[in-house]
Amino acid sequence: MGGIHPKENKLSAGKKIQIAELPKQVVIPLSHYIGSPSEAVVKKGDMVKVGQLIGKANGFISANVHSSVSGKVAKIDVQLDASGYKRPAVFIDVEGDEWLETIDRSLEIKQECNLTKEEIVNKIKEAGIVGLGGATFPAHVKLSPPPGKKAELLIINAVECESYLTCDHQLMLEKGEEILVGVSILMKALDVNRAVVGIENNKKDAIAHLTGLAKSYKGIEIAPLKVRYPQGGEKQLIDAIIRRQVPSGKIPIEVGAVVQNVGTTFAVYEAVQKNKPMIERVLTVTGKNAPNPGNYLVRLGVYLSTVVDTAGGVPEGTGKIVGGGPMMGRSLMNLNVPMAKGSSGVLFIKEEESIRKPIKNCIRCTKCVSVCPMGLEPFLLMTQSERNMWPEMETNRVMDCIECGSCSYTCPSNRPLLDYIRYGKTTVGGILRNRK
Amino acid sequence: MDKLIISPAPHIHSGDSVSKNMTGVIVALVPALLVGFYYFGLGSLIVTATAIISCIIFEYLIQRFMLKGENSVMDGSAALTGLLLAMNLPSNIPVWMVIIGSLVAIGIAKMSFGGLGNNPFNPALVGRVFLLISFPVAMTTWPKPVPFNPSYLDAVTAATPLEMIKGHFGEMPGLKDLFLGNMGGSLGEISALALLIGLVYLLVKKIISWHIPVSILVTVFIFSGIMHLANPEVYAAPLVHLFTGGLMLGAIFMATDYVTSPMNPRGMLIYGVGIGIITVVIRAFGAYPEGVSFAILIMNGFTPLINTYIKPKRFGEKIK
């Protein structure tokens, strides 16, 4: 139900993944998009190697952090990150590129995996793998269903429904075999015999490639999906693939599904089969006036400015730089923010497209209602948020909002629906936490 | 690069706007308007032009001197109100009545509530009903359809099929004429075919959804069909109901007015069924030959209630 179809603008589609150069210093964030920040286990002056643990998970919703470079720890300090907050990070001066001996750096594909369920989950946990789709939820938590719940199938999110982004698309084209091995490892960890990889129809080459490869894997299906934003939302994807809707306030396991992102699946392959922790990921650098849209393999902690310089610099006439996709990404204050596990793209938006148009009266056209993928009434929630009607917002299910932005995108009166809904959701969320 | 814009997501917009939607509806009205020009000639041109121009002028003046807000006259909604009002009027109505109707539509029904988006009742229909109650003779005397009619106030008049429904079945034009629009009536309502072309355009352009027009037409068809089966001597056939009077115009263009109709598909269906039933009841038993305008205005009044109690289908909602 609902959804929109913005212009795809996949300018960097089909561009080979290039390896970004190593800078003189990296700043590796210890905090994550959600959950508690990790605890530093190195101190100033320590020498570290690529893959060495530098931050230990702190609590259930948290993840290990590893050094992405070899060199000397310069300091542990706060750093402005892509979400706009100053948060703790480890600053490392790069010296050479020396990897831990345990990491298998060969490109040879290792198919068989003789580890038990528990061993796999533990390896994923140790490697600090989080959901690479953007929410950065620790991957091992989803692989450990709560007592009494059993997964029936695994869904791999290869939808990449955001316009412009192509990092997952390109990864599938170049690392298809590895991804499918990753899928079978995840299936083993969850003890399920069916996995479905959901890919939108605008990536025909990836669908063909993976469908060909999947023939030699048992239980893995490739599902081509109609192009629709926000189909990459977890609940939306489950609905699209098995026609089951996760009830309000519940998680996917309620309908027997576990969803992992395709990039995460590749990271799982590397962690389990190659002993390689989460130290790098693919980033799309793009924009209508970008000189050289492309996909780059970037180590964590590298300043985005370094990658952008490699890709030809910030184009003339840029009004806004977005970290992530155009619908859910965050606008950046500057490019001196470090690459994080959840960084999927750097998007330049032209000045004329960056400026919002004047707000007009709501004409009650119902377009926001019909595009809302959660069946909410954005026009009503905005009005209630303006008037601080928190109990009414709760009744009207503001907490179901996935903040996809389809309402604001579609509004003919240019009303900032999601801005107000997000404000109301934060406030109502606080009220609900206090009530517990 | 020194000055980057910071704002919350989303960072792109569809490019849709109020004026695009209003223009879309105006374009969808063109086929019916052309049929009106063809059968009613000069009169229809004069009435349409007067209504559109006076609605725009009244909105501009009220906005400028009374509300003193941002000028909204260019968004196309005033022109659309004028056009819709004209389509609901006979083509031989005097110009001064059209101006009064426009003043009521814009001044009382729209701007006194705060302008576009705030009016509880459809402005064009309020204007029409005001004229109908104030000048019943002028509003119910329709000229005979004559291709490229050069006369205006002195046009030869004819009874409309809806008046024949009440007891004069013999004079009724054939279904084909009713469908194409060869009959007396308000200048924009006569051709069901032209109005349906407009409906297709609105649906393709996603300006409206199917729920309101389809629920109204289906309800009228079923309800009048039952009555016709019960007593064909007294009650007209369902197709006659569908193709005559203001039903098509009302179902496609008046009831679907964004501001005054419900905000989700379930609510729209209830609203549409309500309009259908009230229309047939007024047509069959009321004092006026036509009931679509009243039916829509009555259901406009129920819209806030429908919005309060009828919610969209929530994601994850159990279907019982």
Image (cartoon, coloured by chain):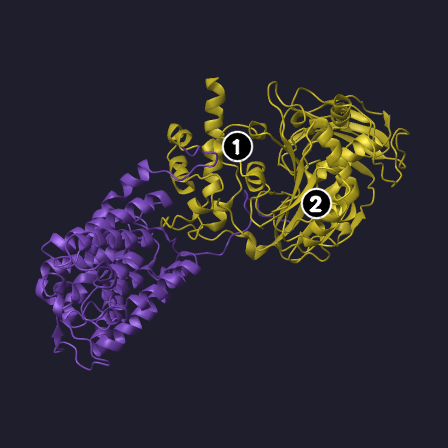
Chain colours: A yellow, B purple
B237 relative position to A245: left or right: left
Q: Which residue is at 32% across, 55% downward? A: B213
Task: Looking at the image, tell me whether mark 1 or mark 2 is earlier in sequence order.
Answer: 2
Mark 2 belongs to chain: A
Q: Amino acid at mark 2?
A: Asp
Question: Disc 1: which chain?
Answer: A
Q: Residue placed at 53% from the left, 27% from the top?
A: A250
Please tell me whether residue B80 is drawn above or below residue A249 in the rendered image.
below
Give the image quarter of residue A151. Answer: top right
Residues at discs 1 and 2 in contact (Cβ within 8 Å): no
Question: Mark 1: which amino acid?
Answer: Val
- Which residue is denoted by mark 1 in the rendering? A246
Q: Residue at x 73, y 56 (%)?
A: A292
Nearer the observer, B57 or A286? A286
Q: Are marks 1 and 2 on the same chain?
A: yes
**Other residues around mark 2 within 10 Å, as few (<14) / some (14–19) / many (≥20):** many
Badge 1 local density, few (<14 within 10 Å), some, or many (20+)?
many
The image quarter containing residue B195 is: bottom left
Could you say where residue A134 lies in the image, as x and y percent from the top left?
64, 38
